[in-house]
Image: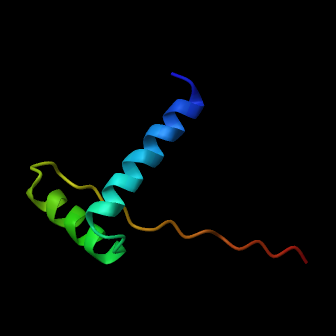
Amino acid sequence: MAIGTIVAEVRQARESLASQFHYDLHALIENASERQKTGGRKAVSFPPIRLQQHNDE
């Protein structure tokens, strides 16, 4: 599968999903959250990693 084919497939899937929710990002995320809760798989969340600041003095 060529990279162009993969990109086209991902874009088509994104467009299909967005159109199902009338391009309402909040509705899409709410639906994804509900599917995650009822999907039966364990969701993993990691704490944020803090980057150290470097003082170049």
Q: Residue at x 17, y 51 (%)?
A: 42
Task: Give percent across and percent down for residue 6.
Answer: 50, 34
Which quarter of the figure has residue 53? Answer: bottom right
State whether residue 39 is above or below residue 3.
below
Where is residue 26? Give x, y as percent. Answer: 31, 77
Q: Position of residue 35 (x, y in %)?
A: 16, 58
Q: Is residue 26 above or below residue 9?
A: below
Q: Name the residue: 33% across, 62% down.
A: 19
The residue furthest right is 57
Seen from the viewer's position, the closer of residues 25 and 42 is 25
Which residue is located at x 50 percent, y 40 percent? 8
Q: Is residue 18 rendered to the left or right of residue 6?
A: left
Q: In the shown orientation, is residue 27 left or right of residue 14?
A: left
Question: For this view, does 23 lie left or right of residue 54?
Answer: left
Name the residue: 20% across, 66% down. Answer: 31
Q: Determine the image quadrant of residue 50.
A: bottom right
